[in-house]
Image (tube, coloured by chain):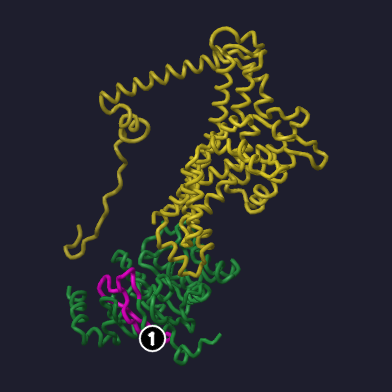
Amino acid sequence: MNTESQQVWQPIPEKPPPSLSIGPVGWARKNLFSTPLDIALTVLGLYMIYVVASAILDWAVFNAVWRGTADDCREGSRACWPFIQAKWGQLIYGRYPLEERWRVDATMIIGVLAMIPMLIPAVPFKKVNAIFLFVVYPVIAFFLLLGGRFSLPLVETPLWGGLLVTLVTSIVGIVGSLPLGILLALGRRSDMPVVRMLSIGFIEFWRGIPLITVLFMASVMLPLFLPEGVTLDKLLRCLVGIALFSAAYLAEVVRGGLQAIPRGQYEAANALGLGYWRTMLLIILPQALRLVIPGIVNSFIALLKDTTLVLIVGLFDLLGIIQLSFTDPNWSTPNTANTGYFTAAVMFWCLCFSISRYSQFMERRLQTGHKR
Amino acid sequence: MNTIPQTNGGNYAIEITNMNKWFGSFHVLRDINLQVQQGERIVICGPSGSGKSTLIRCINRLEEHQEGSIIVDGIELSNDLKKIDEIRREVGMCFQHFNLFPHLTILENCTLAPIWVRRMSKTEANEIAMSYLERVKIPDQALKYPGQLSGGQQQRVAIARALCMNPAVMLFDEPTSALDPEMIKEVLDVMVDLAEGGMTMICVTHEMGFARRVANRVIFMDEGQIVEQNEPEAFFTSPRNDRTKLFLSQILGH
């Protein structure tokens, strides 16, 4: 149709892909049933899931004791939920006095209310929110939980326990260790030899000792070195120990991110006249931290679970208080321990899984579609 | 400040005297002498490894020189961080690989330094950024991220970003070497426009058409030295040095 001298180029129109290769059917064909071995493995896998899941469901739901007393739990192997109901207050508050428990509730509610708008990117006033959450809220929480001021009776930290201690140690650990870890990572890459050596020394020292040792040192050894008459709260000592320990790990995670940022980014920032701190805060860290979100969250989750070790030094976190409640003679049944551990596992899993999901959401959100 | 006596009457934008630089024990720049007038446009070419990029990177202290002096806009480069920052504010730079900040939008890339270094208000910085983005013909991309733009567009953003600081001198380090052939022209057009506006420019580039069209002077470097410099017509038609002839025959011959 075209004249010989002038051809008009026509692209071939797009066609949809063959229907068997897309959608759930295509996915299953490709991933589950592509060869006889695949089919066998798929069937075997499904069978094993069925066996395990049905056993757990039978134990925890269908055959479980839902109402009653310890006597109802003595026979068979089944979850004993009345035990958890009876001990629920302890799981959350530890030995925090009954009439003061509202203070823990208030602290948690204020915290959650301040967190929600912070975690949802679309909500405005992030600056005010952040100042409240990281400056005002810790003060409020401190006085609400500890008391001794503003006509609130003092509740000493040895009375704290359960989920309260787990959350306090892990949140203080996370919030305290991240800035310190970032500073250590920057220090380790610094041009100044003294700063670099100090950072390396700090990181290698804390990474070289087990957390249990840190906690023992904090609770047993440290008081021996303090001058006469100076006492530091045991919980506080553990908090500091955990934060420093975790900071050393975070420092190395963050350093990995810093190393992944190409030199051109530093050069471009320098060429624009940005100094060291502005280059770091505005250009390098936002990119580096985004890169290492998986590693940071990994550390946070490990930290959250490691707080169970405070049991060793006589603080009763969630797991500790559950174990303590096994010794209650009223509830000495064959199913008590299993139910307790199962509950602890579920609660820890919920906490860790929500951190994990939120981090994945943030990772996707911060993705600006680039690779350079 | 008494900076005037060092600047030969004070009208050189850049004055480099007997400058030497080593990478470890490797002597990359040898006895460099270069004066750049206000509004002058210089193209530097030469084989790879000849030290041409290193030379212009010394001008804004991305590289440190060990001997000699570099005076930019009346300010002598030394280890004084304040002076370095002052010079960097006056010298804009474009890189081979653009080096845009991938986590910021195009507009934020352009306003970051004016806001944080020049202490401009956000609205003022936005206005200036948009005017430069219009000048490089991509105002409609302002809210996108660098990763969503083509190479040519990214390099034009990089030029606009540098211009937003209102620099006295612009340095270009092989700005078109990483681009697809289709995109080289759009970047060169912006650079020609800039040159015609009277900007003092030093460009490391192998775009000889660009050199002929806008340069006042073409400099040929090899082995860390300035081998030959001349105004473009004479440089291309009657090079004096054998090394220059060989180089020109290699890049123009095909």
Q: Which chain is green?
A: B
Residue A308 falls inside the magenta stretch: no
Tint applied to chain A in the drawing: yellow
Amino acid type of the residue that numbered disc 1 sits on in the rendered structure: Gln
Secondary element under disc 1, as helix, strand or loop, is: strand
Residues A255 and A212: in front is A212
**Residue at the image position 40 percent from the left and 78 percent from the top:** B193
Q: Going by the picture, which residue comes out furthest to the right? A: A151
Looking at the figure, which quarter contains the N terminus of chain B?
Answer: bottom right
Q: Farthest bottom residue?
A: B9
Please name the predominant secondary structure of the magenta segment in the image.
strand
The image shows residue A43 at horizontal and vertical percentages of: 34, 20
Mark 1 sits on what residue?
A: B35
Labels in figure, total = 1
User: Which chain's residue wears label 1?
Assistant: B
Percent position of residue A357, x then y: 51, 38
* Magenta part of the chain: B21-50
Q: Quadrant of residue A4?
A: bottom left
